[in-house]
Image (spheres, rainbow, N blue to C red):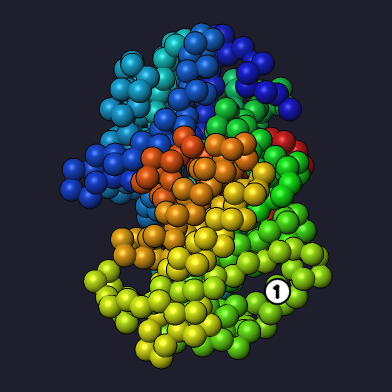
Amino acid sequence: MKMIQDFNFKGLKAIVRVDFNVPLDKTTLKVTDDTRIRGALPTIKKIIRDGGSCILMSHLGRPQGRQEKYSLKPVLPVLEKHLGMKVKFADDCLGEETKKIVADLKPGEVLLLENVRFYPEEEGKPILPDTATEEEKKAAKAELKIKQKEMAKKLSEYADVYVNDAFGTAHRAHATTAVITDFFPEEKKMFGFLINSELEAMDRVLNKPQRPFTAIMGGAKVSDKIMLIENLLNKVDNLIIGGGMTYTFIRAMGGKTGKSLCEEDKLDLALNLLNKAKEKGVNLLLPVDSVNADRFENDAQTSVSAVDDVPEGWMGLDIGEQTINKFRDVIMKSKTILWNGPMGVFEMEKFSKGTVAIAKAIAEATNKGAFSLVGGGDSVAAVNKYNLADKVSYVSTGGGAMLEYMEGKKLPGITAIRGE
């Protein structure tokens, strides 16, 4: 596999799949968080510094056909500001006009193509009416797969080299993430710096962890994390469980959980995970106290109880002080830390204390020499909100992609280049 740092792009056109699926202000349509744009800069700069030209393709949102509110145009000024240069823009990702712009692209220039998801071929999902029969759906999908290949081929003809630097979409077998690689020889396709760093961080945690290795799993549902937890039970020394999924475990063990979130149909699954942890010698830690609310509001009345004794009519929305101390003690003794998911309803200030405390403990442990990997929306939001992103070892840009990789799944965008 070619490594981008060893490749010389001089005189070559590189088509680069980036992840510019950034949040936009609903009124002004201005970019409100440019993290993903900044993540792509090292790869873009390497290509143009070598004397190559750079064709960028990305999606934004989930458009149904061409919808201007999902245009990548708002990305342009932010990208130009970071690169310190003018960036060309094509109003389409295919078509004769775009082909001409690509043909005229000179060494050192950058072109951003319009949203690739304006074409249903990108995802390979047909847009059909609700009345469509199963037979019609099957036929439309088969036809779209052929068109997906055609789209990938057209895009590949723009360039000499393909670079995938969009880790956030690496778990999708889309035209621009996986299918396009069929049209480039082995020595002309590679990952960008961002994907390389993501894979390096995850492989370090999964395959070469320093011990003790602690995984911290939060979030609402056990069912969302079941495969990840099962895979981690073969690798970790400590598994900390927090967030809404706590109460499914507590109910399974016979505890009282009031109106707390609980997956009644997953109680056996929770018990099975507890037994597996015991069998494998994994120290599985559940909260011991719970911050409860009488309703799901930031200004709700609150109370603290033992986690297995939440009063009737109340719901657990955060971990309590005793739990914070218990979890912190384990984190501070760890050499490798993986964190995915909040400890409570992080969006509400009143119930964010547990998540923030865990974020700070991980930062402190990192400062003392631990390697820490943080991924997942709310976990990332927590380290960013409290300016801790540069105090942990690595913050992953790919929520779903990171989860699937950690579960042991093969990601189409990765295997298409790495060949595993």
157 lies above or below 130: above
Classify residue 294 by image quadrant.
bottom left
Total marks placed? 1
215 or 310: which is nearer to us? Answer: 310
**Residue plotted at (39% across, 28% down):** 112
Work out whether residue 141 can be spotted. Answer: no
11 lies above or below 187: above
381 or 109: which is nearer to us? Answer: 381
186 or 33: which is nearer to us? Answer: 33
**Residue plotted at (49% across, 85% down):** 309
Q: Secondary structure at mark 1?
A: helix
Graded by Cα atoms within 10 Å as few (under 14), some (14 to 19) or many (20 or more), the crowding at tag 1 reads some
Residue 415 rendering spot, x and y as whole percentages: 70, 42
Residue denoted by label 1: 274
170 lies above or below 10: below
Residue 240 rendering spot, x and y as whole percentages: 61, 62
**Residue plotted at (81% across, 70% down):** 279
Circle 1: residue type? Leu
Residue 246 rendering spot, x and y as whole percentages: 54, 73
Is 281 placed left or right of 332 in the picture?
A: right
Q: The N terminus lies in which quarter of the figure?
A: top right
Classify residue 56 by image quadrant.
top left
